Image (cartoon, grey):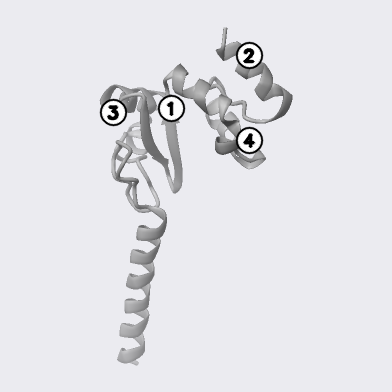
Amino acid sequence: MAFVMVFVLLLLILLYFYLKRKYFTPRKDLPGLEPQFLFGNLIQTGIIPNGVSVAQALTTFKQRYGDIFQFWLGPSYYVVINDIVDVQHIFTNRHIYEQGEVFIQQASILFSDGLICTKGDYETACFRETNK
């Protein structure tokens, strides 16, 4: 019985390290805080314990890390881009950076005031707006 419990415990520990390495390893080439397992940057930025808004946390990250940084909203990974020149480059090369419908729906709920337009006619209108 003790052997089975030790085996299960070892299996859970290995699963934890596998998940942490596979899904919660930050990119070394982008600035940002290292995420905590399952919580990402929510606790570190004060979103969970102090009620800081996501917009306030992203503003703090921009001041600390610059125009491009990585942010973990729980287990979801985001690369945040703030410079309009970089946004224009992404729109110009949208075949490289295009996102699916699920991303657009999630991002429009979380960041309703953000510039979220990556597909179709709506993307073309947004591209024209950023080139003015």
Mark 2 / mark 4, whichever is N-terminal: 4
Query: Residue 8, located in which quarter of the rendered image?
Result: bottom left
In the structure shown, which secondary structural element does the residue marked by tag 4 occupy? helix
Q: Is residue 65 shown left or right of residue 70?
A: left
Mark 4 or 1: the one toward you: 1
Residue at 35% x, 59% y is: 21
Q: Which amino acid does label 2 sit on?
A: Arg
In the structure shown, which secondary structural element does the residue marked by tag 2 occupy? helix
Mark 2 or 4: the one toward you: 2
User: 128 above or below 95?
Assistant: above
Mark 2 / mark 1, whichever is N-terminal: 1
Residue at 67% x, 21% y is: 124
Q: Position of residue 74 (x, y in %)?
A: 43, 45
Instruction: Name the residue tied to disc 2.
Output: 128
Instruction: Name the residue tied to disc 3.
Output: 65
* Residue furthest top in the image: 132
